[in-house]
Image (cartoon, rainbow, N blue to C red):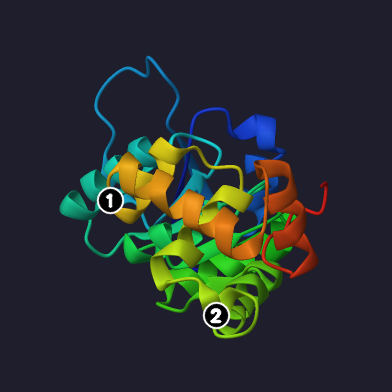
Amino acid sequence: MSVIRLLLPPGFAEIGLDPVELEKQGIVVVTMEPNTAGPMNFAALDLVLIDGEAALQENLTLIDQIKSIAPACKFMVLLRHSSAHAVTYMQAGVTGLLAVLPDAVKLAEIICKLVQGEYYLDQNIAQLLAMRQIKKQLDPFVSLSSREFDVFCLLAEGCSLQAIALQLGISSKTVSNCQTQIKLKLAIDNRGSLRKFANCHGLIIDNSV
């Protein structure tokens, strides 16, 4: 079995990942903890596991930094509580998206596929992305513009106006205007009602609404 070098983000233990079990599957784990002596050798990496709970821009900067040094390196993101940034990560070159952390054997299988150039999308995330593409063309969402629909989904995920503006590459004022139009067109009064509405239509993963 060939050795695969996996980089873990700071705080990997908090997400329940056991490096020892992964190493039994032929995955050599490299950690990136704060205050580590010496520079990180990104060029030797095969895959990086990124915690989607961390700041989006910091994660994207890390991805760009590693890609500039190790173009063949693959990226996988763990999106535990929200899929809001799934498309953004894929646009940045991420080829693996997880909603939950599988056991070491399954995770090792996924890692091997990604390193070989394949894609892996958690079933729930893939279904959600497909559902959004379908729903945006049907009532009642057909009344929304494409941008308004994107804003709607991100609002339902709990993103702030500033975060939505950053992700979509538009101004916060434009996001605010879209929010106003969404509420008018869908007869929704507040963020809580918007989230429940999105959940009823299968447009968010988290059902705790």
Residue drawn where x is 65% and y is 81% of the image: 139
Amino acid type, mark 1 = Ile
> Does residue 129 appear in this view?
yes
Looking at the image, is 47 positioned above or below residue 118?
above
Q: Is residue 128 left or right of residue 174?
A: right
* Residue 114 image position (x, y, % from top left): 47, 70
Q: Left or right: where does residue 39 sit relative to residue 165?
A: left
Question: Within 10 angstroms of label 2, few (less than 14), some, or many (20 or more) residues?
Answer: few
Report the front residue among 109 and 147. 147
Q: For the residues marked 2 and 1, what is the alpha-carbon distance in whole angstroms?
A: 22 Å
Q: Tell me what residue is drawn at x 74 percent, y 69 percent.
A: 202
Residue 76 vertical position relative to residue 34 in the rendered view, above or below: below
The residue lying at 55 percent from left, 80 percent from top is: 142
Question: As displayed, is residue 209 above or below residue 115?
Answer: above
Tell me residue 160's x, y (percent): 49, 37
Residue at the disc numbered 2: 142
Which one is in front in this view, the residue at disc 2 or the one at disc 1?
2
Q: Nearer the viewer, residue 147 or 46?
A: 147
Which numbered marker is on residue 207? Answer: none
184 versus 190 height, above or below: below
- Would residue 176 be found to the left or right of residue 126 on screen? left
Badge 2 vs badge 1, beta-carbon distance below 8 Å: no
In this view, the residue farthest toward the left is 68
Q: Position of residue 104 (x, y in %)?
A: 71, 55
- The percent coordinates of residue 36 (x first, y second) are 37, 19
Figure quadrant of residue 146: bottom left
The amino acid sitting under disc 2 is: Val
Q: Residue at x 48, y 46 (%)?
A: 50
Mark 1: secondary structure: loop
Few, some or many C-alpha atoms within 10 Å of disc 1 (few <14, some 14-19, many ≥20)?
A: few
Mark 2 / mark 1, whichever is N-terminal: 2
* Residue at image mark 1: 170
